[in-house]
Amino acid sequence: MSGRFAFVLRRLLSLLPLLLGILLLAMLLLSLAPGDPARQVAGPRAPQSEVDEVARELGLDRPVVERYALYVAQVASGDLGTSVKTGQSVGDQVVDQLPVTLAVASLGVLLALLVTVPLAVAAARRPDGPVDHLIRLLAVFGIGLPTFWIAIMGIRFIALPTGWFPVAGTGEGAGDFLRALVLPASVVAISILAPMVRSLRATMMELEEAEFVLAARTLGFRGGSLLRRFQLRNAVPPLITVTAAQAGYALFGTVVVEVAFGLPGLGQGLVVASSTQDFPLVQGYVIVFAVLVVLLYLVADVLNAAVDPRVRITA
């Protein structure tokens, strides 16, 4: 247990420079915005005194180094700032919207995994056969499908004709919420499915010539038994890595999906905050999205250490 704890601690410490870089970029969003951010927040007809007050609230009157130090201390204390449009805490808004985004992304990744494994196994079982060619063709086709187009097609040809799924909002109660997640999560799954299938298939094909697979063949293992017990099991670590990468893509893909389906998640909030030039809120969303992606890779590292004996987890 102490070895695993030390492993996780080392990974967390190695991520610290990255997190500090994320905070720096988030802080610089104000400086990179076109025009005068304070003027944009206060309004084009606001008096200069009001613009100066907004600049002080946003910290634009301080040197960059001082602003950064204060911003890091503020975020480290759990304070993501205050919305200049609503006056509400950014942290409170994130907490309210985070469950929707996590639900859509998590269910989408789960659905993608449930489809990826059987498709990749079917393709690797008879390489260059009709099934393999069909799956590879679908994977290539799937990579080129824009997420917003998949969402529109889902609404047009499934939600509207059948009435089984809502086209906007999450409804009331747990049942409505689950129904509202089905199509958005399916769209997320389709958008990340192709790279996962191609990666797992390629890994299993590479493992065909591995020494332990050749040894298993000499012991009489063939077909599905060989694939499941030796190739698929040893393809899990690469699958974890590619799944983490696609889960990060899925998180950012929820921006498009939530807008298309009118879901009150972080993606919808980011679009609204950007359109209203609510810079503290945009900064908060950027930080949360970035931290979630970093945590995904941390979880992937820990899982790989747990399932791959070649990765040392001892202190």
Image (spheres, rainbow, N blue to C red):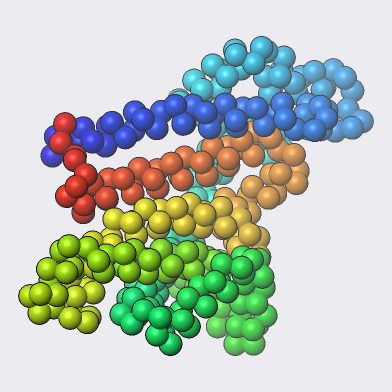
Residue at point 66%, 12% (across, down): 63
Residue 75 is left or right of residue 260, and the answer is left
In the picture shown, does residue 1 fall above or below 76?
A: below
Q: Nearer the viewer, residue 104 or 129?
A: 129
**Along the viewing direction, whichever of 265 and 226 lies nearer the viewer:** 226
Q: Residue at x 34, y 76 (%)?
A: 124
| Coordinates of residue 30 in the picture (x, y in percent) | 70, 29
Q: Nearer the viewer, residue 171 or 230?
A: 230
Quarter of the image holding residue 121?
A: bottom left
Quadrant showing the N terminus? top left
- Count all numbered tags in the image, as a single digit: 0
Whether residue 33 is visible to the viewer of this picture, yes or no, is: yes
Residue at 19% of width from left, 47% of height from top? Answer: 310
The quadrant in which residue 132 appears is: bottom left
Instruction: Give the quadrant of the C terminus.
Output: top left
**Residue 104: where, in percent of width, then height?**
49, 62
**Residue farthest toward the left in the current orientation of the protein:** 219
Q: Is residue 37 above or below residue 250?
A: above
115 shown above or below 297: below
Q: Position of residue 81 (x, y in %)?
A: 58, 30
Can residue 232 be seen at all in this image of the molecule?
A: no
Residue placed farthest to the right in the image? 45
Q: Is 2 on the left-hand or right-hand side of 117?
A: left
Horizontally, is 147 left or right of 5 in the view?
right
What's the residue at 28%, 60% (across, down)?
236
Q: What x and y, as percent, mark residue 90? A: 58, 37
Image quadrant of residue 175?
Answer: bottom left
